[in-house]
Amino acid sequence: MNGSTLDKDERIELLRQMVRIRRFEERCVQLYSAGSIRGFLHLYIGEEAVAAGVLSAIGPEDAVVSTYREHGHALARGLSMSALLAEMYGRATGCSHGHGGSMHLFDAGRRFYGGNAIVGGGLPIAVGLALADAMQERPVVTVCLFGDGAVAEGEFHECLNLAALWRLPVLFACENNRYAMGTALAREHAATDLALRAASYGMPAWPVDGMDALAVADGARRAVESIRAGGGPCFLELQTYRFRAHSMYDADRYRDKAEIARWQERDPIPKLFAQLHASGELAEDALVSLQAAADSELDVAIAAAEAAPFEPVGDLTRYVYTERS
Amino acid sequence: MTTYRDAMREALREALIRDDRVFLMGEDVGAYGGCFGVSRGLLDEFGPRRIRDTPLSESAFVGAGIGAALGGMRPIVEIMTINFSLLALDQILNNAATLRHMSGGQLSVPLVIRMATGPGRQLAAQHSHSLEAFYAHIPGLRVLSAATVEDARGMLWPALQDPDPVLIFEPAALYNAESELPRDLGATDIDSAKICRAGADVTLVAYGGALRLAQAAAEALVTDGIDAEVIDLRTLRPLDEKTLLESVTRTHRLVVVDEGWRSVGIAAEIAARAAEYGYYELDGPIQRVCAVEVPIPYAKHLEEAALPQVADIVAAGRRAVS
């Protein structure tokens, strides 16, 4: 299909992951409005093809470094809805014991390293994880997800230089959703071709249609193969769009509705479903079934989060220093 | 005799030999041998995999140290001087110090960051400051100040054994300092302040480059018949309050010496702890001898005027016991 290297099951799995992420976040909006979850809430709606596609290209031994808009990354990495929701409810059963919240989801066992609220702050960590893997001769890749806003930070340039200089196994996956908070790409960057800028550090870098999950998955596989073959870091510019505001606090006055509507026509979920349906791989009601399955998963996760205990206040000062036995 | 520089190099060599996971990275640490000569010869001995020259990119290589620590290595990151560390403060505060907490205890960052600090070489305002208090402010870090050749030799290994991020501050003015090191010098106790000179009449507390000033002042106070106790704080975070308060309980008088600025600094913290927990032991006001609150100037006479001098500490000691 479209020259994709993915088999049928892999294509359906991409759709399933995107549906899970979408339903999860739509429910988060309701929970936020009801006051059940608080803090900053950065929604990923519209960008699901990136998380599902990029993270489909790596295995459990690889590492992932994420941002504050990371629900989709976490779910696609295999963290459970229960672990995420309990975290957002501030409960002891959350993936960060309620100390992190929506912006700081972690799972050491899955090599999922957050959850970083500082734009660009995860890039050096990704470089270091890749350095550690390279020094220990582990044939693994670190995926570093970040947005177009981070490209303007000094750390982006420091880190691409360092990773290329040391030929480290990092996939820099730039989610170019065209806005750094409320500032449009052309208002934040003198040169808006982000792949070109990464290429100037001497690494393979190319743009990918971030609204097309198959294109993302194929691009990420190609990049990961090149990295695993010892080719050094790669950069993907995943051209995507968030349908919602930057966060729940954002009145979204910087974009016109026609622009949002144009991108919504390219919604990655109906797009992939239509392809799979047209090729006879999925029945007419398959999307509804996937949504229903995600909703059931959510119902269970919400009930569990609401029933879960709070982290005891007595544990307030735990996890500052390692406890000595 | 061993210099402070050689002692630190020996500590690095020992760490690199003892643990394959240890590596050193920073600006000029390899081919150049370290801007203070600390790592001279290590590239030849251990090779470029473990002695890594980095670009001038403090945020990237300090953050890479954090990532490498998460990934199972034991990195030692050298930042040339403390003023450059501000370019990496985001990584140190927002990642190294907080990842453990934000992850609910899942992640540890066993990283050591070393850097030169302090005044005394006429390097003017961007290369002379003692900003240790910035770091001592941050929960999640262990902050060490190596004031002696012994600690330059003995502090690194226990710092590397610590599962959390440790910063070691090395006063640049001390790299040529010499001392006879005992053959059986063990690891420094990085949990405790050190009583360097026992005394009965007044406690002089210092750290880093100020320690030798406090020691000289203590010797000078002998001619006044004042027997001063000198304490090297050594660990600026977490503070060893116990040693401090026990000393004040013995001497009932306190002078704090700090090459950092007076306001909101280490000396302020020490004075506050003594007042909070040792108030009824004190027989007089706490004295502080700190840097004047100006950016450190270049001209020698102005630089000296801006910094604590032995005579200032002696005068403070006399005031304390009067």
Image (cartoon, grey):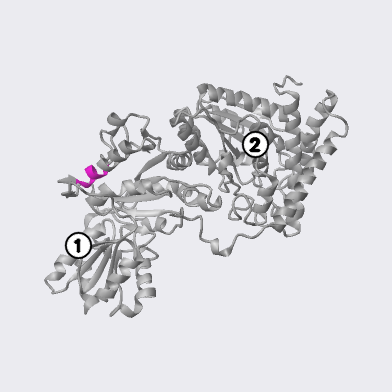
Q: Chain of mark 1?
A: B
Q: Position of residue A2 (x, y in %)?
A: 75, 21
Q: Check if residue B40 falls in the magenta segment.
A: no
Q: Quadrant of the N terminus of chain A?
A: top right
Can residue B52 be seen?
yes
The answer for how far apart the CA atoms under marks 2 and 1 are is 59 Å
Badge 1 amino acid: Gln
Q: Based on the displayed image, in which of its 4 quarters is residue A63 positioned?
A: top right
**Dot 1: within a 10 Å radius of its alpha carbon, few (fewer than 14), some, or many (20 or more) residues?**
many
* Residue B210 image point, x, y percent: 26, 59
Q: Give the residues drawn in magenta, as a range.
A: B3-8
Predominant SS along the magenta part: helix
Residue type at the position of mark 2: Asn
Residue that extends furthest to the top in the rendered view of this protein:
A3
Q: Which mark is residue B215?
A: 1
**Chain to which the residue tagged by mark 2 belongs:** A
